[in-house]
Image (cartoon, grey):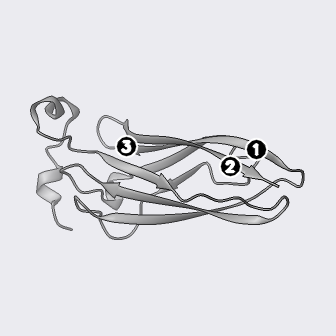
Amino acid sequence: LPYKEWMAGWDVWVDPYLGRPQFAGTLAVAPTTPKAGDPFTLRVEMVNTGVCPWVERAAHRLVLSGSVEQLGLPASWTLTGNPLAPGDRRIVELTGKAPAEPGQAEISLKLYNTSRAPAVFVETNLTITWD
């Protein structure tokens, strides 16, 4: 994998001295309005805006909280496959199922860097409404 040696020296104390953080990014969730009782797909676009790549072996993890169980969404997703170099983007598709009765739920998504000093480096919240 590229960056193997560079990654070995990462530590959180370096960030204040850099022009941009080692691990940074954005999360954008495509709007979805599922029908009550129907399955749906939550599309999450992740963009690496930091200076370090996101790699499978570092176990970068997207953690969902809030009403995820009510919506049948997974509690987490771990990065697999090709690394995301700075500037790269990936769309993750998470499947769930809307409850049978119309309603609304709040969920939070947090992307963790779990190597050395585990930390959240990007997060977003959203509301899902189903009818």
User: What whole-number distance in Å separates the C-alpha atoms at marks 2 and 3?
Assistant: 28 Å
Q: Nearer the viewer, mark 2 or mark 3?
A: 2
Q: CA distance from mark 3 to mark 1?
A: 31 Å
The amino acid on which the numbered mark 1 sits, given as a three-letter code, is Gln
User: What mark, if any, has residue 114 been given in the picture?
Assistant: 3
Residue 118 located left or right of residue 96: left
Q: Vertically, is 79 above or below 118?
A: below
Q: Which mark is residue 104?
A: 1
The residue beneath circle 2 is 128
* Mark 1 neighbour class, 10 Å CA radius: few under 14, some 14 to 19, many 20 or more: some
* Amino acid identity at mark 3: Thr
Say whether disc 2 or disc 3 marks the residue closer to the N-terminus: 3
Q: From the viewer's perspective, is residue 60 above or below residue 11?
A: below
Point 43% across, 51% down: residue: 27
The reply to whether the C-beta atoms of the residues labelled 3 and 1 are less than 8 Å apart is no
Q: Is residue 112 above or below residue 56?
A: above
Give left or right: position of 122 versus 110: left
Residue 19: x percent and y percent?
Answer: 11, 39
Q: Earlier in the sequence, mark 3 or mark 1?
A: 1
Real-space Cα separation, disc 2 to disc 1, in angstroms: 6 Å
